[in-house]
C-alpha cells in the first residue's frame, strides 16, 4: 500500500474517459534515494509525479475567453463523466488515508464501463520508468 505522505493527485477527463495519476517524487532519480518500496512491510514511499509520467500535463490549454470557459469545459463531455471522476478521486484519497491504496494510476472508460488500475509495485513502476527494479527497493 501507499503511505499517506505528501501526494499529488492529477485527474482529468475527456468525453467518455478519465484518468487519475498519483505521485510525490519530482525527479525520477530521487525514487531510489527515498527507498521507494519497502517489500517487507508492503509499503510504497515514492512514485513519480504525474507530470513525469505524462509530461503533456504541463502544456497549457488553448486560451479561451471568460465568457466561453463554462461552454468550453462542457463541450463534448458526457453528462456523467465528471461525477465518475470525482467519485474516483474521493475513493483514492480515502484509501490513501486509510493505508489501503494499492495503485498509482487509474483509467476509466464509460463506453465499456471499465476501470483499469496500475499497481504501485516495484515491477510495474520500474517497467514504466525504464529502470531496474532493484533501484526502487529499500536497502535497510
Image (cartoon, grey):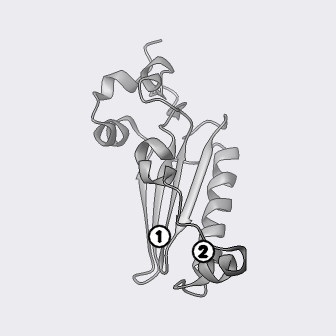
Q: From the viewer's perspective, is 128 left or right of 59?
A: left
In front of the other: 53 or 1: 53
Q: Nearer the viewer, residue 1 or 73?
A: 73
Mark 1 = which residue?
A: 108
Q: Quadrant of the N terminus?
A: top right
Query: Which residue in the structure is indicated by mark 2?
Result: 84
Figure check: 27 above or below 102: above
Q: Position of residue 106 (x, y in %)?
A: 47, 59
Mark 1, secondary structure of its residue? strand
Residue 2: x, y in percent? 56, 39
Kindly give the residue lying farthest to the top in the view shown. Answer: 140
Residues at circles 2 and 1 in contact by the CB criterion of under 8 Å? yes
Q: Nearer the viewer, residue 122 or 9?
A: 9
State the image coordinates of residue 126 (x, y, percent, origin top left): 32, 35
- Relative placement, left or right, of 7 versus 104 is right
Asked if residue 70 is positioned above or below residue 122 in the image, the reply reads below
Within 10 angstroms of label 1, few (less than 14), some, or many (20 or more) residues?
many
User: How far from the left and from the top, in percent, is residue 110?
Assistant: 47, 80
Can you see residue 54? Answer: no
Q: Earlier in the sequence, mark 2 or mark 1?
A: 2
Assign a secondary structure to mark 2. helix
Is residue 76 in view? yes
Most foreground residue, 18 or 124: 18
Q: Label 2 neighbourhood size at 10 Å, few (<14), some (14-19), many (20+)? A: some
Residue 88 picture quarter: bottom right
Total of numbered circles in the picture?
2
Position of residue 15 relative to residue 133, above or below, is below
Residue at 44%, 28% in the rendered image:
39
Classify residue 5 by image quadrant.
Answer: top right
Distance Cα–Cα, label 2 vs label 1: 9 Å
Amino acid at each position: 500500500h501507499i503511505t499517506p505522505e505528501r501526494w499529488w493527485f492529477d485527474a482529468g477527463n475527456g468525453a467518455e474517459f478519465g484518468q487519475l495519476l498519483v505521485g510525490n517524487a519530482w525527479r525520477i532519480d530521487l525514487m531510489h534515494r527515498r527507498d521507494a518500496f519497502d517489500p517487507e512491510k508492503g509499503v510504497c514511499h515514492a512514485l513519480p509525479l504525474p507530470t513525469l509520467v505524462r509530461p503533456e500535463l504541463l502544456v497549457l490549454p488553448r486560451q479561451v475567453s471568460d465568457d466561453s470557459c463554462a461552454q468550453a469545459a462542457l463541450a463534448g463531455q458526457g453528462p456523467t463523466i465528471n461525477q465518475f471522476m470525482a467519485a474516483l478521486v474521493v475513493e483514492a484519497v480515502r484509501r490513501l488515508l486509510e493505508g489501503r491504496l494499492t495503485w498509482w494510476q487509474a483509467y476509466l472508460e464509460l463506453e465499456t464501463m471499465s476501470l483499469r488500475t496500475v499497481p504501485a509495485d516495484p515491477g510495474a513502476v520500474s517497467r514504466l520508468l525504464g529502470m531496474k527494479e532493484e533501484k526502487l527497493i529499500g536497502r535497510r
